[in-house]
Structure formats: structure tokens, C-alpha cells
Image (cartoon, grey):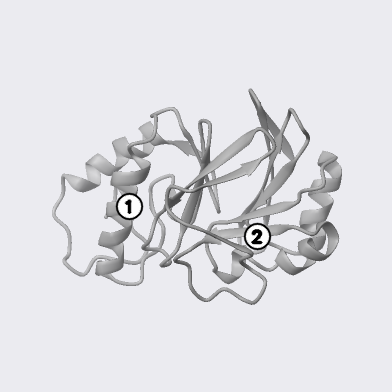
Amino acid sequence: MQRHDDGDLSIISAGPVGFGNNIYIVVDRATGESAFVDAPGTAEELIAVAEEAGVQPKAILLTHSHFDHTPGIDGLKQKYGCHVYAGAEETNLAEGHRDTAVAHGETVKMGSLAFRAIHNPGHTPGSTTFVTGAHAFVGDTLFPGGPGRSGSNALLKQELESITSRLYTLPGNTTIWPGHGATTTIDLSRAEYEVFAAKEHDPDLHGDVSWLDS
């Protein structure tokens, strides 16, 4: 487990668990209130991280509905009574996996912190990034080196549009906290994307795309 302090908030990170997923807990340092971002791995693994950090999260900010990001939800609701916030456009959510639907531009409040929801369709219909301060929890929309996996060229184009128009307009020093792997920043990711954008591409390009190699 690692703790990253930045002004009014702390970010607890751990893992990988499950399918190489990262565990994130965001803590409001003023009030001690906290929230999970997604619920990967098992509830027992997530609860162990929360207990080590000395927090009792009451919310889950769900970036999307894929099975590797949701398996701990039911156990966390049973343990902590967590309230689940998920994108209004998201599909294939199990019962109880969205208590509040969050639309693009809406804000989720937690103590003194506010998380702005950014709708990023492409990886899934309702993929949502949650932004607070200089931190963006992007789920599987954006990684160091490329976008999240897309099921078709049309979905890749949709994903790229949402990344370039909604994420790359964030301040350049914003940290990107992806669902898997290492962090990066908006500036670094945008510079890699510019290499990709300058090249010709297969009209059917989709799947696992690399900014530098695709």
C-alpha cells in the first residue's frame, strides 16, 4: 500500500489484484471521509487495504461495468454500506451496482472534496472519469501509451474524441490514475497521442492501440 498526500486529499493505492487492477481509495483529509474508485479483486482484499489505511469508505466511484472492476461491490456494500456512483450512460450493470446515475459534468461530493464526472464513451458506453483537483481516475479509458481497448473502429474513434476533447483539455500536470498499470500525466499522454495523430492508420484500427507503435 502507498499513500499519496496532495493538499486536501490523500490517495491510497494498492495492488495489483484480480486482472492486474489497481486499488484506489481517495480520502478527504479534512473530514476523514473516503471512497473507493472501482471495486476490483475481492471484497476481502479491498477491506484489508481500507483497514490498513485506517478508513471506512462510504462510497464507490465506478468508472465502468466490466467484470474486473466490480467484483468487490456487494461485499463493500455489506461491510461499509457503500453508495455506488456510476455513469448515467453505462450498460450491463448488475443490480445494486449503481445507486446514483452520474451524468457528464455532474459533481459527486465527499466531505470537502468534489469529483467532476466526465463521460468518456468508447471502452464502454458509459465509461466515466472522476476528476478532483489535479487527479483524474480514468478507469480503462486511458493508459500510459494508449487508449483503452476498443471493440471496433467506430468505438475507437468515439473514445479518441472523448479523450482529446474532454481529458486533454485538463491541466497538463493532472495525474492520470488508470485502472491497470502505472500513472502518467495529461501532458505526457497528449505528447504521445500527437505522434499517433500524425500518422496514417488502418481504417479498421481498433483493439489494443499504442500511441507510438500503432
Q: Residue furthest left?
A: 200
Q: Of residues 87 and 153, which is closer to you in this image?
A: 87
The residue under the point 35% across, 71% down is: 151
Q: Is residue 19 shown left or right of residue 72?
A: left
The residue under the point 55% across, 68% down is: 65
Could you tell me the amino acid type at mark 1?
Answer: Ser
Q: Residue furthest top?
A: 7
Q: Earlier in the sequence, mark 2 or mark 1?
A: 2
Q: Is residue 168 shown left or right of residue 66?
A: left
Screen quadrant of the C terminus: bottom left
> Could you say which quadrant of the image residue 114 lies in?
top right
Crowding near the residue tagged with mark 1, few <14, some 14–19, many ≥20 C-alpha atoms within 10 Å:
some
Q: Position of residue 145 (x, y in %)?
A: 39, 46
Q: Of residues 35 and 17, which is closer to you in this image?
A: 35
Q: Position of residue 50 (x, y in %)?
A: 80, 47
Question: Do the CB atoms of the residues marked 2 and 1 lie less than 8 Å apart?
Answer: no
Q: Report the disc number at residue 50.
A: none
Label 1, on which residue?
A: 162
Instruction: Please tell me how many numbered marks the rendered image carries.
Output: 2
Q: Is residue 141 shown left or right of residue 181?
A: left
> Does residue 53 sit above or below 140 in this rendering?
above
Label 2, on which residue?
A: 84
Mark closer to the observer (2, 1): 2
Could you tell me the amino acid type at mark 2?
Answer: Val
